Image (cartoon, helix red, strand yellow):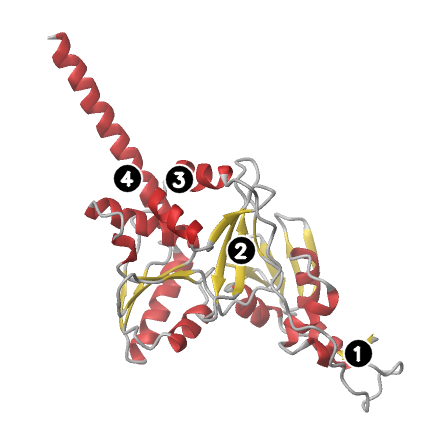
Amino acid sequence: MLMNSKLVEQARNADMIVFLGKHCGFTFSTKRGAYRCKQHPSLAVKNDRLSWYWHSKGIGGFGSIDFLTKIEQMPFRQAVEVVMGIPCSAVHSTSTMGSQNATPSATSPPITLFLPEKAGIPLRLYDYLCVRRGISRHIVDSLLRDGKIYEDRRGNVVFVAYDDKNKPRFACVRGTYDNKVFRMDCVGSDKRYGFSTEASAPSDRLYVYESAIDLMSHGSLENAATGDTGAWRRHNRLSLAGTSDVALSFFLNQHNEVKELVFCLDNDEPGREASGVMAKKYADMGYLTQIELPSAKDYNEDLAAQSAESLSLSRIKANRYELNRQH
């Protein structure tokens, strides 16, 4: 079975800027004759909008297929399918000459999400999320029970998004080792499905974040502020996995009850810009919108700062107690 050469050629020449925006949620600015990714400044696309190089990874190529096969280790046929946004059967041809009269194969499987194998006991997950990131143990326990997070056999944390039939449709992996930053989307992920949590009771408000870590961090801050371990479940929450609103638009189409949007993106230039654009866009569509930026760069940094302050206050109180005992 051969690949349909015409479709492969179209996929090879697909606009990288457009593709990376849809597939990864990346946005770009022009600088020194090239496009620079705002989320990953070391990723550059040349003016031809095809040639690219990710400097921090030391990997480059030509076109979207190269990006998927080299960066996401995606099989070639699946990469063509993802770029073209079509079923596998249309990418293959039963004709050995690749003629225009060839009939598509009906035996090729649809795109499949490949989830990493689970670890037996999630020891590194708790250390990474609760100890190093400061996220509420109640939130982590709840997400583990729901199958929305788990630890894989390599010690990474996996974040999973589901469709309305409770089928996994998107997953991203985050490394837990201090000496190595590792983040990637799992092969076969559908960017329309963002990592999300539902309100425990009917709510028309949706909080929107750039990452799952920020979603959990903001929820932890609410729990701490109210003294209620269930406060984070009062409203719906959604991670965009970046600053693209692909997942938001799809979520709203599936949840007609949502009327109010609170944008909690990062407090940096890309985050502020995206917040402003989306707040206006969805306000024009009839939603009540507001922007709630963190004090630091993101909500996990806010959570870390609060935890450090709480620890400092505890030490001060302990020292005062010791002084009182001495006197």
Residue at mark 3 to residue at mark 4: CA–CA distance: 14 Å
Residue at mark 2 to residue at mark 4: CA–CA distance: 27 Å
Residue drawn 49% across the image and 70% down it: 192
Residue holding disc 4: 306
Mark identifier at residue 130 = 3
Assign a secondary structure to mark 3: helix
Quadrant in the rendering for residue 103: bottom right
Mark 1 and mark 2 lie on one chain; the one further toward the N terminus is 1
Could you tell me residue 189's position as x and y percent?
Answer: 57, 64
Left or right, 172 with reference to 206: right
Mark identifier at residue 5 = 1
Q: Please state which of residues 161 and 59 is positioned toward the viewer in this rendering.
A: 161
Residue holding disc 2: 172
| Amino acid type, residue under disc 1 in the picture | Ser
Q: Please state which of residues 317 and 111 is positioned toward the viewer in this rendering.
A: 111
Which is more foreground, mark 3 or mark 4? 3
Q: Is 214 situated above or below 10?
A: above
Assign a secondary structure to mark 4: helix
| Amino acid type, residue under disc 2 in the picture | Cys
Q: Quadrant of the N terminus?
A: bottom right
Which is more foreground, mark 1 or mark 3? 3
Q: Please state which of residues 36 and 98 is positioned toward the viewer in this rendering.
A: 98
